[in-house]
Image (cartoon, rainbow, N blue to C red):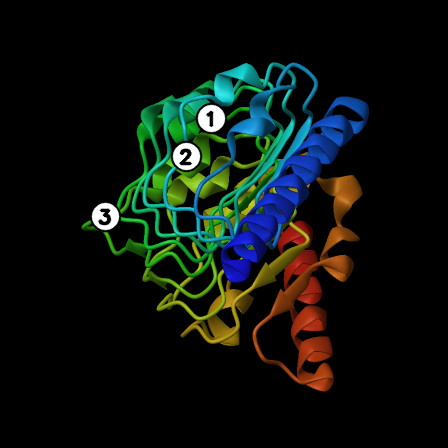
Amino acid sequence: MEWLSEWFDKIGRDFNRTYKGEEAECAKAAATGIVSLRDGNYTVIPEYVFKHGDRVRVFDATNNRIQSLPDKFSSFLVLSKLHLAHNQLTELPTSILLSTITTLNLEHNRLTTLPDAIGKLIRLRKLELHHNPLKELPPSVGDLQSLEYLDMSHCNLFHDGAKKIDLGIVGRCLALVELRLDNNSLQTIPESLCNLKRLKILTLDNNLIENVPNSLFMGCTQLQKLSLLGTKVVVEHIQKVRLSWMFCFLNCFKLIYWFTFVLVVNLSPHRMSSFLKAMWIDSLNDVRHL
């Protein structure tokens, strides 16, 4: 029976190692406010992480095999950053949508929608949803008035007038500074995006877009980078975008903005220079005709 004794000894050692590991993690969470389960091959979130929920500010369970989340996240009273990227989540319980969260990373999961309660994240500044097979967005996404960064690349998004997914909702997130919609099936740019006065970066690479509405430049007055790599937009169309007399009047001290504006449409440096020069001369001509 020597083998049986060795087997029990091994079980005991494994149990002690696990117990001590959990004890150490609990102590770390209590001391630092950080819970890290990253790369741990977890399929469920262990119970011990909730023992010091009133102190946890950062929860990171990136790169595991978690398929569902427990309803115990409400014990995280001061949680600020929640990282659940690279898992197998198909839905989110409303219990994780805490008003204290500023960063929510859900990239590389299997989400098809978001809960309506997403709009309650009044402090949310960064939302990463890329590489999820989204089929719809709840209207409450437009209530995210603190949101500055949104990434919905590789999400099977459509917007062709028949509106498979209503991206117009995003146009209500008025604090947005950076919006990434690369590698989808977008055919048009929603007019509502022109309401984003603070938007500085808009990437639309590898979509089916053919035209850029003039109102995008008129409304997004702080836009610095517009990326259209792999789309059907041609330079000649963009060159027709002119500054209206009102736009010139309201932004006469920002004309130098055109020199710093970056438009990525697969141009060589020489063609890029020629394009920006033509746009600048065109704009000055408009001013002369006021």
Residues marked 1 and 2 touching at CB (< 8 Å): yes
Residue 95: name its quadrant: top left
Residue 122, compared with residue 46, is above or below; it is above
Q: Is residue 177 visible in the rendered structure shown here?
A: no
Q: Type of residue at label 1?
A: Ile
Q: Which residue is mark 1?
A: 96
Counting from the top left corner in percent of width and height, residue 173 is at 50, 31
Residue farthest along the left direction in this orientation: 162
Q: Type of residue at label 2?
A: Leu
Dot 2 falls on a residue whose secondary structure is loop
The label nearer to you, 3 versus 1, is: 1
The label nearer to you, 1 versus 2, is: 2
Q: Which residue is mark 2?
A: 69
Residue farthest along the front direction in this orientation: 1
Question: Position of 48 compared to 204: left or right?
Answer: right
Pick the quarter of the image with the C terminus: top right
Cα separation between marks 3 and 1: 29 Å
The numbered disc on residue 163 is 3
Dot 3 falls on a residue whose secondary structure is loop
Q: Is residue 162 visible in the rendered structure shown here?
A: yes
Give the mark nearer the N terminus: 1 vs 2: 2
Q: Type of residue at label 3?
A: Lys
